[in-house]
Image (cartoon, rainbow, N blue to C red):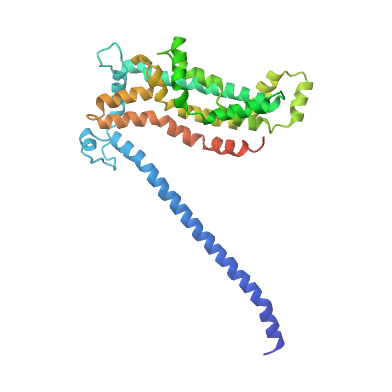
Amino acid sequence: MPAGYVAAAKETAPRLTEQRRASSDRRRKRWGSVCTYTLLIAGSVLLIVPFIWMLAASLDTQQNVTGGNVDFTFHDPQVQNFPESLKLMGAAADANGDGRVSLLEIVRLRFPALSNTIVVTVACIIGQVVSSSLVGFGFARFNFRGRGVLFALMLSTMMLPAQVTMIPVFVLFRYLGMIDTFWPLIIPAWLASPFFAFMFRQFFAQVPEELIEAARMDGASNFRIYWQMMLPLSGPVIAIVAIFTFMSTWNDFLGPLIYLNSPENRTLALALAQFNGQYGVRDAHLLMAASFVTMLPCIILFFAAQKYFVESVATSGLKG
């Protein structure tokens, strides 16, 4: 064999080996992606099945739901189940009436359980954002004696179960005469959550000190720096605090169950539980409709706020 062919073969062999290796890596990555997406799709289908069943049951008849023959084809949707379920929830929340509340009366009264839940949720969101951001700003931008000890003490309260403080807090609010009012549900949100304060502190610590000093040289007070500089910059953290607070407050059942006694003060969670107790066996399709209506804002918020959730996770907790 001529020497030229031998040299060419020696030069070509490494390139062929590299091409085979690259091709093998591409196939491995392709199969890895296929397996990953297959598992994700299977998990998504598994998690979404209960929601599909709830929607199908809320649009089906009483006979099909109670008999276990829920129609998933939606060929004859019973849309009237939704206003009927709201009517029954309103009737369950009516304290002085005879239990027969028309849909127009519910709309006119703005549906007490829904309006109560909105009031408590909005107040808690505002309280958590304001109080937690103030605490985070203080720990991030002020140097004072014992700051590290106080910060560690605040974080250590996250390990304290809520059941431990439940009875003392109830006794405190009863002593203050706030039982059967919304204050026991709202006031704790205005006292700052340790986790949310930690998130704000981590975010505020990333702001360059030169920016703060420039604002002070222009005559800005500490509150003005916090209100006009820090809060506008912390949009992602505010978004995640608002999302978490909305989810926990909107779906809260134990707090309203402990502190609210009057039917007119019930939130959606309590009204739904009362609905379940009165109509859960006989009218399961209406129960599913009421549950879907109650859960709908959380679903909308989940899809609308995904970008802010990812952004907040990416921008907080990186420095401290």
Give me the residue at 52% from left, 23% from top: 125
Coordinates of residue 198 in the picture (x, y in percent): 60, 30
Task: Specify the quadrant of the image occupied by residue 75.
Answer: top left
Residue 119 visible in the picture:
no
Towards the viewer: 137 or 33: 137
Labels in figure, total: 0
Q: Is residue 66 above or below residue 223?
A: below
Q: Quadrant of the N terminus?
A: bottom right
Coordinates of residue 196 in the picture (x, y in percent): 57, 29
Give me the residue at 32% from left, 39% from top: 53
Name the side, left or right, on which 223 lies relative to 310.
Answer: right
Give me the residue at 38% from left, 15% from top: 265
Q: Quadrant of the C terminus?
A: top right
Residue 305 visible in the picture:
yes
Q: Is residue 48 above or below residue 106?
A: below
Coordinates of residue 4 in the picture (x, y in percent): 71, 85
Give me the residue at 61% from left, 72% from top: 17
Q: Is residue 159 above or below residue 25?
A: above
Name the side, left or right, on which 19 lies relative to 166.
Answer: right
Towards the viewer: 299 or 183: 183
Judged from this view, the residue extending furthest toward the right is 217
